[in-house]
Image (cartoon, helix red, strand yellow):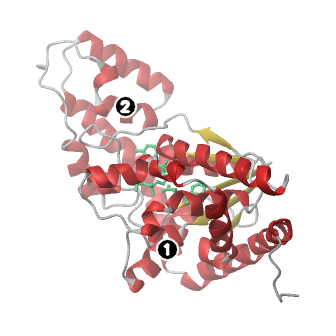
Amino acid sequence: MRVLSGIQSSGTLHLGNYYGAMRQHLELQHEHDCFYFIANYHSLTTIQDGSRLRELTFHVAASYLALGLDPARVTFFRQSDVPEVTELAWILATVTGKGLLDRAHSFKDKVARGLPVSMGLYCYPLLMAADILIYRSQIVPVGQDQLQHIEMTQDMAQYFNNTYGQVFIRPEPRLSEAPVVPGIDGQKMSKSYGNTIDLFADPQVVCKRIMSIKTDSTPVEAPKDPTRCTVFALLKLLASPEEVQEWEVRYRAGGMGYGEAKARLADLYEQTFGPYREAYGRWLARPDDVEDILRTGGRRARVVAQEVMDEVRSACGIVTARA
Ligand code: ADP
Ligand code: TRP
């Protein structure tokens, strides 16, 4: 099975990225033909500073490698090393009604927050569909917020096939066990909401963030509802199932303060991510090796993309002088 996913290089990676998306990317590498890439063209919709984008792209690559991505198993690359995706995005735009893009939550959310909307942001789903279809991806593991983009991709594949004949296959989304990880304010964790707990942050910084997780004002002695508590939601991700059960009993029994659960969460964070933070530091010191890995992956990915694009151009009657 061809599995594909991308992550933008638009900020620091956080627990939402890891438990919502990256952890399943890493699990799937053992069973499938995985293509994972850094969506740096997409990042241009938010990062418009060349040196910052270069740096973030390198940081996302080092993060995946530190978390255990095996470049010998995975085709790991930068989106921009396969420029054909932008060509496919254009072709998909010509068979896609504007109404489909008008319905995208991601840009409606930005409009609602009063942020400016560039054409790049508006067309974001076209480029994402191109990313998926150009590698004939069958499974796309993502967090819940990306589901609509994948449904749009299915629609675009259908529009193209209806117009030009069967070229694209229908990709299916795959959600992790934590499709929406809450941030410290209880909303979805997201870099754009400023509520993240970052993956490789300094232990003291993380501890402070964890201690500032919003909880209700139930007194220590009173029973508490674990299903409505962000600390418990995060404990569920980091603790063993047995420990989670114990916490659940303690929440419901009362006599436990949120501070205690937070302190345990901070410990578990350190146990889990401390070793990854060290590995991250080691990859940061090897920029040439990271670059080699991305280039090798990019060359492999491009071969697949070029084959598919030959079929696409031939179906549409686009003649190029390329050999
Ligand atoms: P952000 O919302 O911080 O900008 P991205 O859009 O770059 O994050 O997300 C990269 C991947 O991580 C996507 O597959 C997305 O669905 C997933 N993801 C991001 N935040 C969360 C979250 N809070 N819970 C679950 N998955 C998430
Ligand atoms: N939109 C995704 C995000 O913000 C990143 C992305 C770009 C992607 N192209 C993709 C994810 C293709 C899966 C498949 O997280």
Q: Position of residue 120 (x, y in %)?
A: 46, 68
* Residue at image mark 2: 233
Give the labeled residue for mark 1.
57
Where on the picture, by quarter, is residue 292?
bottom right
- Label 2 CB, ligand 1: below 8 Å? no
Q: Residue at image x 51%, y 64%?
A: 63
Q: Give the structural element (helix, strand or loop) at label 1.
A: helix
Mark 2 nearby-residue class (10 Å; few <14, some 14–19, many ≥20): some
Q: Does dot 2 land on a helix, a strand or a loop?
A: helix
Q: Is residue 197 visible?
A: no
In the rendered view, tell whether residue 291 sits above or below residue 213: below
Rounded to the nearest angstrom, the CA distance separating label 2 from label 1 is 30 Å
The image position of residue 278, as x and y in percent, is 46, 65
Image location (x, y in percent) of residue 296: 73, 78
* The CB of the residue at mark 1 lies under 8 Å from ligand 1: no
Instruction: Give 81 or 115, whichever is nearer the viewer.
Output: 115
- Foreground of the two, 196 or 247: 196
Question: Mark number for residue 268?
Answer: none
Q: Earlier in the sequence, mark 2 or mark 1?
A: 1
What count of labels does the image hold?
Answer: 2
Position of 63 compared to 211: left or right? Answer: right
Q: Is residue 81 left or right of residue 195?
A: right
Amino acid of disc 1: Thr
- The residue located at (43%, 38%) in the rendering is 180
